[in-house]
Image (cartoon, rainbow, N blue to C red):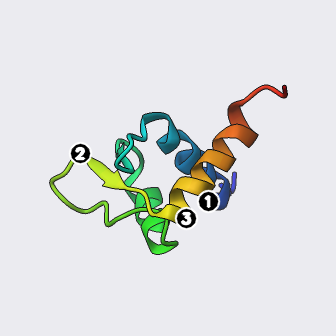
């Protein structure tokens, strides 16, 4: 089975929206490779640190909300 890493990244970015605080921080308890890819794409701060959270960039916040709504919300 071949895994679509883009879909994995989108799902993780959408889930980061769940724990997003008003300062743009979110818990980083996801796969390290995926978190590194999200950092390389410019959506989150560097996940390699002692902090238990990452900071989403403005683009990351916008995209995470869009993906969360598209993947997990029921149509109104």
Q: In this orientation, does residue 9 appear? A: no
Seen in the picture, residue 51 relative to 45 is either above or below; the reply is above
Residue to which mark 2 is pinned:
52
Gap in angstroms between the C-alphas marked 2 and 3: 21 Å
Q: Residues within 10 Å of mark 2 (few under 14, many from 20)?
A: few
Select label 1 or label 2 by which is in front. Answer: 2
Residue 53 vs residue 60: left or right? left
* Image mark for residue 59: 3
Q: Please name whichever residue, 10 or 70, is drawn nearer the observer in this view of the structure.
A: 70
The mark nearer the N terminus, 1 or 2, is 1
* Image mark for residue 42: none
Which secondary structure lies at badge 1?
Answer: helix
Residue 15: x %, y % from top left? 53, 40
Q: Please name whichever residue, 75 or 51, is drawn nearer the observer in this view of the structure.
A: 75
Q: Which of the 4 quarters of the picture holds residue 30?
A: top left
Who's the residue at 25% across and 63% down the image? 48
- Residue farthest to the left? 50
Residue 72: x %, y % from top left? 69, 32
Residue 63: x %, y % from top left? 62, 56
Residue 25 vs residue 62: left or right? left
Who's the residue at 47% across and 58% down the image? 34
Select label 1 or label 3 by which is in front. Answer: 3
* Image mark for residue 5: 1
Q: In this orientation, does residue 38 appear? A: yes
């Amino acid at each position: 089975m071949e895994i679509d890493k883009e879909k994995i990244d989108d799902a993780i970015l959408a889930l980061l929206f769940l724990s997003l605080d008003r300062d743009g921080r979110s818990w980083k308890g996801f796969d390290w490779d995926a978190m590194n890819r999200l950092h390389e794409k410019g959506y989150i701060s560097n996940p390699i640190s002692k902090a238990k959270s990452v900071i989403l960039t403005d683009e990351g916040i916008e995209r995470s909300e869009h993906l969360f709504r598209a993947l997990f919300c029921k149509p109104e």
